[in-house]
Image (spheres, grey):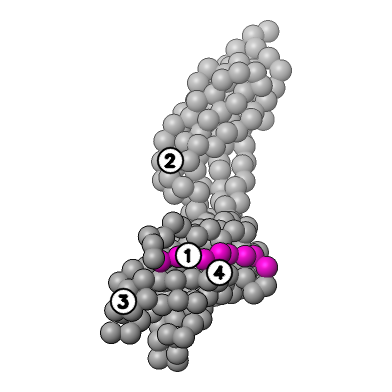
Amino acid sequence: RPAALSISKGNGVDVLSEGSRSTYTVSIRNSGGMPATGLAWLDSPDGMEIEAITPLEATPPSDAGSCSLEAPMGCTGITVAAQASVSYLVQARVTALVEGRADAVVRNTATLNGAHCNAAAPCVATDTDSLRTPVHLSLTKTAAKTVEAGQVLDYQFSIGNSGQTPAAAGQMLTVAEALPDGMRLTGATAGAGVASVACTGSPLLCEVVLDAALEQGATAAYTLHATAPAV
């Protein structure tokens, strides 16, 4: 049987955020009975910048060839033995912006060129991912305007996310907090969306652990308890 080639490309995810990096695996497969030689594949990013293309070790007589980031970007001098494959890792950075588009996407296409590719052969592979704005956290703090000497004053904190990408469940956020002069921290309580909160040092550094993904528009809360100085 003659050589029968196909190419695949994927990064294992369906969504990327602005400015993020992603690693793609490109694989060229020869399911035929004869080796395929003199092959090349080209990388065509859309909304991304390719930072590195690394050929993985091939089993002889297959040869992954050599790769370049200069135009035409991709790899040349490739041999794929019968019933074998060669693979590459492609590292890319998202450069596109959402700019208010609900249907924003980024694409990365690998095109295989050689004598065994034609219009009917599966020699083009495109990975398409939805594009989202990154995590964008905000913090608000509220408390009573006055407190009696020696009494407890609670500070209520709310963490919000205005980005389309959720902050991951279990993520630890570090919040720096300077209490007013004379106020002494007596405790911290986790609220909705927070698994734990612990504060140490002066000025205070609070480690806040999310107990669920913080989606766009959602909030997570915690409270710091402090005692006002006695007169």
Who is closer to the viewer here, 186 or 37?
37
* Residue annotated with mark 3: 31
Q: Are marks 1 and 4 in contact (CB under 8 Å)?
A: yes
Give the residues drawn in magenta, as a range.
62-70
Q: Residue at x 45, y 65 (%)?
A: 63
Residue 155 point in image, percent of width and height:
58, 30
Who is closer to the viewer here, 10 or 152?
10
Quarter assignment of residue 190:
top left
Residue 172 point in image, percent of width and height:
50, 37
For the residue marked with disc 4, what is the amino acid? Answer: Cys
Between marks 2 and 4 in the image, the one whose residue lies nearer the viewer:
4
Q: Residue at x 45, y 90 (%)?
A: 118
* Residue annotated with mark 4: 75
Between marks 1 and 2 in the image, the one whose residue lies nearer the viewer:
1
Whole-angstrom CA distance, mark 1 to mark 4, is 8 Å
Q: Residue at x 41, y 77 (%)?
A: 36
* Residue annotated with mark 1: 64
